[in-house]
Image: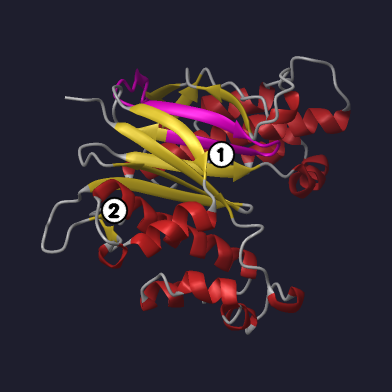
Amino acid sequence: MAAPEVFRWILDTEPEWPCPDNVTSGRDAAPRWAQEPDTKHALMLLPVHEQEKVLRFYHIRDAKLSLGSQLLKHCAIVRACNVPWPESIVSKDVNHKPCYIPPGGSNRQMEFNVSHHGSIVALAGCADNGIRLGVDVVQVDPSKDIPRVRQEGWSSWVNTYEAVFSDQEVQDIVSWEPPQHVSEEDMIKAKLRQFYAHWCLKEAYVKMTGEALMAPWLKDMEFRNVQVPQPTNELPSTESTAWGEIWSDVEVWLRGSKVADVKMELQAFRNNYMVGTAVSSLTASFLPYEILDLPHDVYSTAEAG
């Protein structure tokens, strides 16, 4: 039997579906935005209840992420399961994770998971119903965190999130130092990137299991041998690329024992994003991420079926 392949997509919503007259938020912002031709075209590809979900958001940036997320789910079902777009019904499994269950069926036919942060939507999917998947994308924005870190101190700031990390992880994050001597601000930036690497991995793993960050075993699970993948602007290559370094040698430990049936990967995207993927199969292969072009990759798939 061939090893399951995990396909992975990225969609940047920043340039898509412009806001009318620079309206970015407000109670009436989403309905106004929905009347724009590009937005209307995209919304019409979704069932009514999903359109309504998108238009509930107060901030247009959040509505755009929701719209992108819904479109990628349908696109994944159509491509992986070979069904027409109108029949690409997004279902939920027993853990309320999105999946595809064929009409009249009781078992899911494919597994996929979606995450969004900043302006990026990430999706990981696999047409193998025997595995579980989790994906998480994080945007590292030091400008939001540095003022609090300076006010509270690094250790106190990290301990704000102690419910999410094991005691050893908290110690690792607090004590980590960048390998080179840098300015105070660059040191905080490097430490924040290390923190968000841990966060991204934990989110991806938890999403794979179908449990939230309130899972009772959360503090009993820890990641070891975590390395921060270098972003694009820190790589020695002069080749222009959106993708930075990949780190896949992370170890997962639960209650003192190594978890042997999970494969994980963390990759830098552009200069300020990281994407983590978790799959419950050591034989599964991660296909390289594809940065989707909305008209060419998504709209054409919808209009073909």
Quadrant for residue 8, please give it: top left
The N terminus - image quarter: top left
Rendered position, 303 above or below 290:
below
Query: Looking at the rendered structure, which numbered label has been put on residue 99?
Result: 2
Callout 1, which amino acid?
Answer: Glu
Q: Amino acid at mark 2?
A: Cys
Q: Earlier in the sequence, mark 1 or mark 2?
A: 2
**Which residue is depicted at the point 74% across and 24% down?**
234
Question: Which residue: 56% across, 72% down?
Answer: 39
Q: Is residue 115 magenta?
A: no
Magenta stretch, residue numbers: 254-277
Q: Quadrant of residue 21?
A: bottom right
- Crowding around mark 2 (Cα neighbors within 10 Å: few <14, some 14 to 19, many 20+) is many
- Secondary element under disc 1, as helix, strand or loop, is loop
Q: Quadrant of the C terminus?
A: bottom left
Side of 278 relative to 119 (left or right): left
Q: Is residue 271 magenta?
A: yes
| Cα separation between marks 1 and 2 | 31 Å
**Count of numbered circles on the image:** 2
User: Is 24 left or right of 143, judged from the image as shown?
Assistant: left
Note whether 23 is above or below 268 in the view shown: below
Residue 92's image quarter? Answer: bottom left
The prevailing secondary structure element of the residues shown in magenta is strand
Q: Residue at x 35, y 60 (%)?
A: 304
Disc 1 crowd rating (10 Å Cα; few below 14, some 14-19, many 20+) is some
Residue 97 visible in rendering:
no
* Residue 132 or residue 18, whichever sits in front: 18
Circles 1 and 2, Cβ within 8 Å, touching? The answer is: no
SS class, disc 2 = strand
Q: Which residue is mark 1?
A: 162
